[in-house]
Amino acid sequence: MNGNRTKNASRNILVGLVMKITQIILPFITRTAIIYILGMKYLGLSSLFTSILSVLNMAELGVGSAMVFSMYKPIAEDDHSKVCALMALYRLYYRIIGLVIAGIGIALIPFIPALIKGDVPPDINIYVLYLLNLGATVLSYWLFAYKNSILSAHQREDVVSKVKLYMALLQNVIQILLLLLTHNYYTFVMTMLGIQILTNIVTAYYANKLFPNYKPIGTMPKDEIKEINGQIRDLFTSKFGSVVFSSADSMVISAFLGLEMVGIYQNYYYVVNSLIGIIQIIFTACMAGIGNSIITETPEKNFRDFNKFTFIIAWISGFCTCCLVSMYQPFMELWAKKENMLSFLFVIYISAFFFIWEVYRAINVYKDAAGLWHTDRFRPLTTALANLSLNLLMVNFFGIYGVILSTVLSVLFVGAPWLLKNIFSTLFPHDYMRKYIIKISTYAVVTAICSCVAYVICIMIPIKTGLFMTLVIRAIICTIICNLLFFLAYFRTNEYKDALGLVKKICKR
């Protein structure tokens, strides 16, 4: 596996990128159709139920990551029987998870109206809509979900990505046609349920085809099951915090500000989340390789790779942040109409959140790849509770701006310092932490300078040919300014040289 890390990561990034771009464009078209055909409240409903079901998915939290992590070593050692036993255990756990989610989901039905301020669209029964969404979630666990583990552990995320690509294409085409023909939101949701089932079946087919020797048979020794369960418990706390953190905003906005504001907020967040999803391709593609490297390489080599990895993410995130600051508002006006826009202050907050979040996730990748879940088990939950508490406090004083600001503050002052402490007290020498903090601080400063310079230049250039040309010209300005300033700031550093070498190697692959 050691010799194939770069090859596998390169393939996964390429396929994942194509898949993600498609999954951004098609839902964007679908989302636009909802805005213009049904209205903003339907977007709010969709976002609210997505957030609720994300919290319900906490039953899975930790199982997938722990099982894939447990497979790294037996795969490297060609221990087929152990991998098969792990798959059998994984299947059992996912069957139980589906039952738990179904039970908790049904128990929550009476409380759904309390999460919605104001009225709902007159043709919608929120209970029926909720049960359809719940059914899609439950079935996703019962239908061969455990098969994904063998693909992930072998760094074959490209297979999963291809299946998702074709299924996303099918789903969005059907949904758009149904919206145009029926104007019925129920058919939209039922299509999602059917495609989820089909996705699981097709993914399982390819897992069997690529790895026919791996069957869910055999049993694990009790002591190893106990160890895995311990990892799952540690991951549960961690992942539960992540789910609460990501879902709290929409639920708080819905409960305090109404469904329309949820829809407007989610339009802005959709742009950021699309960029997060694209960068996630890099994280997912590199995860297994990083995990293998941590096992086989020296701490010094891993720390140098860690710096290189952070630098690459900081450059990509910095460029995206620069583009967000200058291009967000004209894009939102072109897409969702002027009456569905928030102020430029919100753009500053959400752009800052994006950059901080991406660097934060880059650090978190190494924590997950190293399996440091026990050490880190309370940090995500504490960060999420801080975010939720600040949300509930600040939404009353600052409205929608308080919600996004509380998210920025909880990551910056609670989550990030704690995560750094955990990483450098277990994985890397503690005396390296100060240098690393200085590095990421300079990345943030350079990103802020790039964003300010590009924005000033953008607003100084009068454009009278429409919003689309405004976006094109601003994209060119941001691309030149940001990448030039980053290059001038870092072209002499070791991180730049290492990153350039890696990019050349990936291009050759």
Image (cartoon, grey):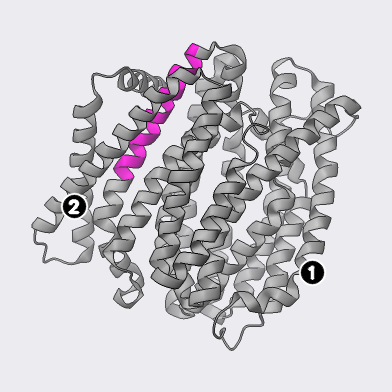
Give, as a single range, the part of the protein colored magenta: 300-320
Q: Is residue 12 in view? A: no
Q: Which of marks 2 and 1 is nearer the N terminus?
A: 1
At mark 2, the secondary structure is: helix
Q: Which image quarter: residue 350?
A: bottom left
Query: Against 29, is 231 above or below?
Result: above
Query: Against 43, is 244 above or below?
Result: above
Tell me, yes or no, whether the highlighted magenta stretch contains residue 357. no
Report the residue at 64% width, 31% height from top.
375
Query: Against 169, is 223 above or below?
Result: above
Q: How many labels does the image show?
A: 2
Residue 95 location (% of width, % of height)? 83, 49
The answer for how far apart the CA atoms under marks 2 and 1 are is 50 Å
Give the labeled residue for mark 1: 107
Residue 252 location (% of width, % of height)? 54, 68
Looking at the rendered structure, the kind of residue marked 2 is Tyr
Decide which of 172, 437 is in the foreground and name it. Answer: 437
Residue 422 location (% of width, % of height)? 56, 30
Q: Which image quarter: residue 359?
A: top left
Report the residue at 52% width, 37% height from top.
418
